[in-house]
Image (cartoon, rainbow, N blue to C red):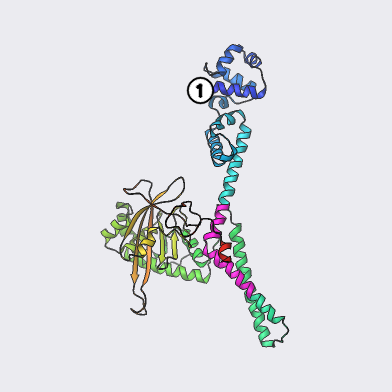
């Protein structure tokens, strides 16, 4: 139904203009304007332009009403604050009658949403990131060491020159470590919510370097290693991790060159089980290879037997944290069944309910020290975006118990909202 007349009436009343005065200014009778305002007569053309001009509006505003995006933002804001009593159904009328106030409400709603997202990001960092936990523990350890050494130097008992020099070196080294860790934490917390998170661990550094090219290493394709890898500077520990990653990458690339795996991957829709069957290669190797193909949109997660994440190439919108990751992800199921492929559709929490296809497998390697030592087990999981419902209900997964909204999950290890400070106090 055309609500142009209702919008004219609302704006006229807001402006305090009598119906007869507006009708006279527009060159029509008051009775005709009354029919228009009650949506009993259609209006357009020059008459709509004259009425809009008298009301100080654009004709398009009266004809089309408020911007649909603006109304949607206002409705979202009302739904998000149910205690205010705001009726989402009145958003369109409010936007048409008071467009300035409507834009203000929408702008404040966007600002609130941005602040809430920033808060969630910081809470997730504080709650889940073991690198942050280690950094904070490192600060505490450095401060404690400095205090202990200073107490010895300032104590009543004399300290010979040799020991004084050692203690001074210890204080200097600890102070250097404290300054470096503090600088890293400052950069970590000062990062905008939409910006890259500063690396707090060598593994973070490695993954940030790999993410620059989507984990694809062109210089290693075809076994050609003569071209130097032009990686940005990283710490020695991160450099060692990159070297280990590249060694595995090179072996995978030699076994499955691009001209071999590329056509098969396209033909099989990047289904790792089908690709592995056609090429006769180990499933874990195929999954690693599919994740690093040029322009690959697949995610990859590798963990050890303890469930610690060794490498993660996440998909957009998928949160994977190194500590406390949801135990229902198929990669952890695979750890208990080495050699057996595990395939499952999973669903993320939230209104969107994003579905993903996951394929995982764990490999068991004999310990180099001998059979009396436990085998070395690592699990690999390839994640493919998928929006279609599967034949069975998806497995509900999430980033971790502390931020997961599924309160009735039988796999929950702890209540939501447990902060890092509580962990320190325990």
Residue 80 lies in the magenta stretch: no
Does residue 314 appear to the left or right of 375 in the view shown? right
For disc 1, the marked residue is 2
SS label for mark 1: loop
Does residue 176 appear to the left or right of 394 in the view shown? right
Q: Position of residue 231 (x, y in %)?
A: 49, 64
Q: Position of residue 182 (x, y in %)?
A: 62, 66
What's the residue at 62%, 65% (across, down)? 183
Position of 104 relative to 183 (above/below): above
| Depth order, front residue of 257/335 | 335
**Prevailing secondary structure class for the magenta stretch in the rendered image:** helix
| Depth order, front residue of 185/207 | 185
Residue 150 sits in quarter: bottom right
Position of 55 relative to 240 (above/below): above
**Which quarter of the rendering shows the C terminus?**
bottom right
Does residue 358 appear to the left or right of 70 in the view shown? left
- State the count of labels: 1
Circle 1 packing at 10 Å, graded few (<14), some (14-19), many (20+), is some
| Depth order, front residue of 168/91 | 91
What's the residue at 44%, 52% (across, down)? 408
Residue 15 sits in quarter: top right
Is any part of residue 65 visible from this angle?
A: yes
What's the residue at 61%, 28% (across, down)? 97
Q: Position of residue 208 (x, y in %)?
A: 50, 61
Is any part of residue 226 visible from this angle?
A: no
Residue 121 lies in the magenta stretch: yes
Q: Position of residue 253 (x, y in %)?
A: 35, 64
Q: Which residues are magenta?
A: 119-144
């Amino acid at each position: 139904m055309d609500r142009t007349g209702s919008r004219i009436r609302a704006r006229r009343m807001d402006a305090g203009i009598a119906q007869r005065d507006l009708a006279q200014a527009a060159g029509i009778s008051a009775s005709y304007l009354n029919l228009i305002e009650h949506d009993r007569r259609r209006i357009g053309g020059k008459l709509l332009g004259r009425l809009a001009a008298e009301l100080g509006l654009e004709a398009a505003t009266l004809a089309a009403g408020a911007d649909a995006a603006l109304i949607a933002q206002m409705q979202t804001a009302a739904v998000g604050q149910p205690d205010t009593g705001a009726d989402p159904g009145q958003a369109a009328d409010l936007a048409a009658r008071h467009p300035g106030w409507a834009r203000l409400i929408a702008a404040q709603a966007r600002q609130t949403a941005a602040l809430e997202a920033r808060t969630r990001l910081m809470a997730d960092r504080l709650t889940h990131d073991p690198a942050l936990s280690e950094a904070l523990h490192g600060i505490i350890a450095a401060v404690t060491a400095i205090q202990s050494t200073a107490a010895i130097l300032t104590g009543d008992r004399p300290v010979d020159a040799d020991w004084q020099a050692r203690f001074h070196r210890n204080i200097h080294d600890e102070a250097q470590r404290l300054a470096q860790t503090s600088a890293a934490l400052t950069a970590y917390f000062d990062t905008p919510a939409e910006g890259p998170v500063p690396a707090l661990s060598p593994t973070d550094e490695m993954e940030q370097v790999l993410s620059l090219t989507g984990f694809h290493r062109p210089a290693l394709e075809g076994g050609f290693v003569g071209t130097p890898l032009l990686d940005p500077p990283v710490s020695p520990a991160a450099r060692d991790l990159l070297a280990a990653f590249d060694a595995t990458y090179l072996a995978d690339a030699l076994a499955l060159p691009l001209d071999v795996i590329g056509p098969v991957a396209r033909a099989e829709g990047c289904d790792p089980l089908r690709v592995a069957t056609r090429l006769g290669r180990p499933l874990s190797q195929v999954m690693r290879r599919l994740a690093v193909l040029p322009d690959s949109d697949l995610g990859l997660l590798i963990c050890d037997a303890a469930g610690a994440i060794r490498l993660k190439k996440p998909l957009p919108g998928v949160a994977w944290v190194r500590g406390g990751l949801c135990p229902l992800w198929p990669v952890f199921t695979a750890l208990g069944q080495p050699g057996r492929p595990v395939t499952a559709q999973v669903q993320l929490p939230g209104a969107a309910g994003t579905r993903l296809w996951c394929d995982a497998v764990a490999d068991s390697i004999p310990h180099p020290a001998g059979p009396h030592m436990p085998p070395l087990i690592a699990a690999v999981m390839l994640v493919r975006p998928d929006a279609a419902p599967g034949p069975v209900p998806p497995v509900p997964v999430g980033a971790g118990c502390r931020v997961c909204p599924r309160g009735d999950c039988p796999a929950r290890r702890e209540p939501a909202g447990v902060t890092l400070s509580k962990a320190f106090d325990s």
